[in-house]
Image (cartoon, rainbow, N blue to C red):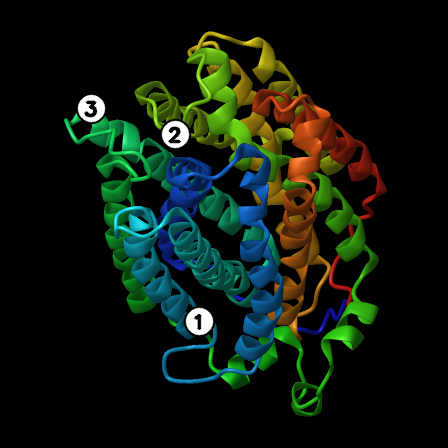
Amino acid sequence: MNTNLKKKPDLSFMKLWNISFGFFGVQIAYALQSANISRIFSTIGADPHSLSYFWILPPLMGIIVQPIVGSLSDNTWCRFGRRIPYLFVGALVAVLVMCLLPNAGSFGMAVSTAMTFGLVSLMFLDTSINMAMQPFKMLVGDMVNEQQKGLAYSIQSFLCNAGSLAGYVFPFLFTALGISNVAPQGVVPDSVIYSFYIGAAILILCVVYTTAKVKEMPPKEYAEYHGISEKKSEEKVSLVQLLRRAPKVFWTVGLVQFFCWAAFLYMWNYTNGAIAETCWQTTDPSSGAYQAAGNWVGILFAVQAVGSVAWAVVLPRFSNHKIAYALSLLLGGIGFLTIPYVHDQYMLFVSYLLIGCAWAAMLAMPFTIVTNALNGDHIGTYLGLFNGTICIPQIVAAAFGGVMLNLVGSHQCNMMLVAGVLLAVGAVAVFGIKETIGEE
């Protein structure tokens, strides 16, 4: 690590808040997607054994787009900033797609055409959300010093969970307000459609706020704070070369990420069917009971977000990061393992509070550990590449989802057992991480 670097100044709490505030809106969009996509496709007519395949294209696009966005933003200097132009464009596309996706069954199309429309919309939604989400992590790496980075990511984690909470409860709230939660066969209920509309409006407002309030460093100042010489800044390095030069921690944290994100992909895919089966005793997506279960999934995911916020307060009290990380994943694994055996919808709160512990660690620790091991040069590209540790496990898990569902007796609730085992393995993998500071 270069000890002669010019030290970044401390930022006020409000400036740290402004850097990440747009994340609140982005996370509402992400929460609506993760809680309702399986519900939407099941309502349109998807077979449960094919459900996971609908999730392959989004992370596949993410793994292609994220390194490109990171690399381009590393070399983008304009009047609007370095990362913010990509944040704004990603958010704008997400808003447009959020208004289209829940209407996939409302245009009078045949089931196959509606599925294709929904799949393409989902692909663009996930890509645009990731395009809008990633710059927030890069902004912290660019603008925040090492002493405040933990606080900055904690603020980001809080806003992430607050956005999740809002997005998850929207369908339940709109149903309580009298908006219809049932619709003709193959059509998504208005409670879900209106949730996406409101989420889109909040997203663009939050991103406009961050765009107006945050002023990124100009090139010369950035180079001074990150020790980048003019010669080094002009260096052209391929993505393959950067991967070869990546610190070991990049790969060891990535291994943990593999098991974590595969587990959560199965949660997002199969929770709706699992809860409908165990608590509402139905597997019929056209039934009112299945749609009621869908609303309750939003409440459970909101409970998970609350558990994540609470556990995020506890995590800094651990002196050993590895113990905290591993324990969090183990608690989440226990939460998953209990789901098939709980038939009371309220008792599931305990399971999802435990899952929230794992989610808190997944949000806070990987990017903190990895950004601490990187210098300022190529940080955007590296974070784009690191996003592959989120996308690849989802692709693999989605590709084998139908096979796994058959192996566990075609009961979607049993996929929660698979998720629990994956998190337990991830907890073990944590002990292979060796934290480093400022090495590239």
Mark 1 / mark 3, whichever is N-terminal: 1
Position of residue 31 in the picture relative to residue 178 (left or right): right
Q: Secondary structure at mark 2?
A: helix
Q: Is residue 245 visible?
A: yes
Q: On screen, 346 above or below 73?
A: above
Q: Is residue 178 above or below residue 156?
A: above
Could you tell me if residue 17 is visible in this image? no
Measured as percent of width and height from the top left, residue 292 is found at 33, 22
Residue 176 numbered mark, or none: 3
Instruction: Give the spatial CA distance, label 2 vs label 3.
Output: 13 Å
For label 3, the crowd category at 10 Å Cα-Cα, with few meaning under 14, some 14 to 19 and many 20 or more, is: few
Q: Quadrant of residue 306?
A: top left
> Which residue type does callout 2 highlight?
Gly
Label located before the other in sequence (2 or 3): 3
N-terminal of the two: label 2 or label 1? 1
Q: Amino acid at mark 3?
A: Ala
- At a point 51% along the width and 31% down the height, the residue shown is 308
Task: Determine the CA span between mark 1 and mark 3.
Answer: 37 Å
Residue that label 2 marks: 298
Q: Which mark is residue 301?
A: none
- Assess whether mark 1 and mark 2 are in contact (beta carbons under 8 angstroms): no
Nearer-the-camera pick, 187 or 313: 187
Q: Looking at numbered disc 1 in the image, what kind of residue is underneath it? A: Tyr
Residue 86, numbered circle: 1
- Between 258 and 11, the residue placed more toward the observer is 258
- How packed is label 1: few (under 14 Cα within 10 Å), some, or many (20 or more)? many
Q: CA distance from mark 2 to mark 1?
A: 29 Å
